[in-house]
Image (cartoon, helix red, strand yellow):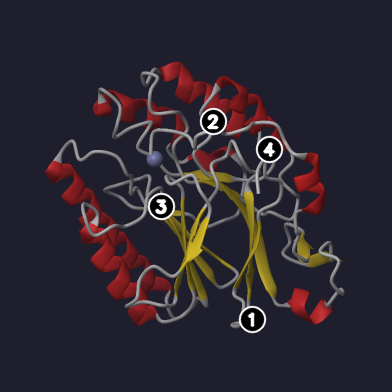
Amino acid sequence: MSKPTAGVQLRICRLCAATSVLVSCVILAWTGVPTQVSAESGTTDNTNESDKNLLTFAVMGDVPYTPQEYALLERQIAEIPKNAEFVFHVGDIKHGVPPCTEDIYQRVATVLAASKNPLFIIPGDNEWNDCKKPDEAWKYWSKHFQKFDKRWPHMFPVQRQQERNENFSFRHRKVLFIGFNLVGGRVHDVEEWATRQNQNVDWLHRQLDDSSTKVDRVVILAHAFPNSHNRGIFREGLISQLKAYGKPVLYLQGDGHVWKKDRPFKEAQNILRILVDQGGVASPLLVTISADDTEPFIFDRRRRTSE
Ligand SMILES: [Zn+2]
């Protein structure tokens, strides 16, 4: 999506910050050993609950859209809690209106590279598909963001699709993470859209084939929602494969700018979808994956400029 939510205020509301509900969390060291348990929600500390937490990570999207959001993003990156083992940016690193000049990619990459922990990024439509010259924009994206996580000396065994390097996956503590190039925006090339979606379906198939028996949770990362209109190929593949998988799945996306939490696929009710707040109105979302089947995904929306 190209345009930010109308009336977005960049000012951080101190009241919101003070009252936002923080979930209990386990701070995990790089060794994977839980080192500290904190209960910040005002509820009773429950060690048994916390023991079920497998890992925590941060996710953001659709930022920076304005000059002011560069400074905001710098702050957000610096303030990502230490218990977030890694960070995802689900695409749209620019507003849709300004031309796709290389300096934007370079500047955003510099801001994101300041993250203390590995950051993975997938493309959005504003920095590629919807650019006046998508091929040129793709060159800039590839140059500055392809294999972005390799900037950190991490131990995650990341796999990348041979035909489509921006599609990645890794397994960590019985959770399978899979990133896809699925953007919104206009269909500028029907053939390219079909090929890419088929490759995405393939990528999902291969990852589930390798890992489905070894993991208890799957996290899907994509910029856009798999609608039936022009993203139907991926939608069908996603629903049928994840329905067969059967265990809890989290679909994390951006593009819409306004928080949404629902189960949009009636055929596959094991898929929970979260549309993250646009980065200008909220700090990166913290997601904790739990081994507790009654609440496998725990969300902390942290600071927001509007409630
Ligand atoms: Zn978008």
Q: Amino acid at mark 2?
A: Pro
Find numbered disc 3 in the image and state the secondary structure of the residue it sits on.
loop
Looking at the picture, how far across and down is residue 240, in whole percent? Answer: 28, 74
Q: Residues within 10 Å of mark 1 (few under 14, many from 20)?
A: some
Q: Which mark is residue 292?
A: 1
The residue identified by callout 3 is: 222
Q: Of label 4 and label 2, which has the lower sequence position? A: 2
Q: Amino acid at mark 1?
A: Asp
Q: Residues within 10 Å of mark 2 (few under 14, many from 20)?
A: many
Find numbered disc 4 in the image and state the secondary structure of the residue it sits on.
helix
Q: How many marks?
A: 4
Marks 3 and 1, how far apart in space? 25 Å
Q: Amino acid at mark 4?
A: Gln
User: Which residue is at 49% across, 22% downward?
Assistant: 106
Picture quadrant of residue 34: bottom right
Q: Amino acid at mark 3?
A: Ala
Q: Which mark is residue 76?
A: 4
The residue sitting at the front extreme is 7
Q: Of label 3 and label 2, which has the lower sequence position? A: 2
Q: Quick check: is the Cβ at mark 1 less than 8 Å away from ligand 1?
A: no
The residue identified by callout 2 is: 64
Q: Of label 3 and label 1, which has the lower sequence position? A: 3
Q: Residues within 10 Å of mark 3 (few under 14, many from 20)?
A: many
Q: Quick check: which quadrant has ligand 1?
A: top left
Q: Nearer the viewer, mark 3 or mark 2?
A: 2
Marks 4 and 2, how far apart in space? 11 Å
Marks 1 and 2, how far apart in space? 35 Å
Q: Quick check: is the Cβ at mark 2 less than 8 Å away from ligand 1?
A: no
Looking at the picture, how far across and down is residue 113, in whole percent? Answer: 60, 33
The quarter of the picture where the N terminus appears is top left
Q: Nearer the viewer, mark 1 or mark 2?
A: 2
Q: Is residue 213 above or below residue 203?
A: below
